[in-house]
Amino acid sequence: MTDGISLLKADHAKVKALFKECEALGNGAHSSRRKIFEQIDRELSLHALVEEKIFYPAFKAKTKSASDERDEVLEAYEEHACVKDLIAKLEALDPSDETYKAKIQVLSELVTHHVHEEETVLFKEARELLSKDELVTLGEQITEMKAEQSALA
């Protein structure tokens, strides 16, 4: 079975590739940029959902109050909020708007920062705080929630 962290890292790689694809588009590729953004939106929304409902609560439950680990997970929630705000702005914006491409670039930078923190700090701490069996259980829960969400879409 795959552990939860491996699944989350796979999501990170998928979104990174989508941002790269988006960045390679020319300035006039409004329709293509919008289609890729819609994929990014779906991927990030599902990823945030499983992190906020499954992974972060399990991680937070293993931390002590007023600890560096607790601060890390609280910061991750806040970074998600910033990403969601920018996604909402992009959803409401016409892709031909002169700020659309810039907003996607800022979204990419926010996500890149968040991913870096998760992969270099939070996931390392999670591997120390959670057992292998707990991480596999989280992986099963993440897989199940993703399947449920896909069925609803």
Image (tube, helix red, strand yellow):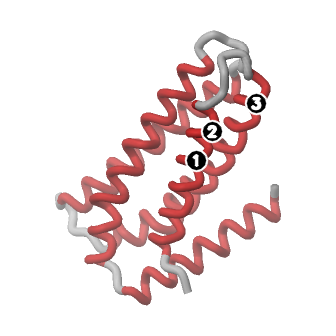
6 horizontally vs 65: left or right? right
In the picture of the structure, the residue carrying the numbered disc 1 is 17
- Quarter residue 40 falls in: top right
In the picture of the structure, the residue carrying the numbered disc 3 is 32
Specify few, some or many for label 1: CA neighbours under 10 Å numbering under 14, 14-19, or 20 or more.
few
Quote the CA–CA distance across marks 1 and 2. Answer: 6 Å
Q: Tag 1: residue type?
A: Ala
110 horizontally vs 126: left or right? right
Callouts 1 and 2 close, C-beta under 8 Å: yes
Residue at (29, 68) in percent of width and height: 124
Residue at (73, 69) in percent of width and height: 147
Q: Nearer the viewer, residue 68 or 36?
A: 36
Residue 96 in the image: x percent, y percent?
72, 14
Q: Earlier in the sequence, mark 1 or mark 3?
A: 1
Residue 21 is marked as 2
Say which quadrant the N terminus sits in: bottom right
Q: Earlier in the sequence, mark 3 or mark 2?
A: 2
Residue at (82, 65) in percent of width and height: 151
Quote the CA–CA distance across marks 3 and 2. Answer: 10 Å
1 horizontally vs 41: left or right? left
Instruction: Kindly state the secondary structure of the residue where label 2 is placed.
Output: helix
Return the residue found at the far top. 98
Q: Tag 3: residue type?
A: Ser
Q: Nearer the viewer, residue 66 or 150?
A: 150
Instruction: Kindly state the secondary structure of the residue where label 3 is placed.
Output: helix
Q: Tag 2: residue type?
A: Glu
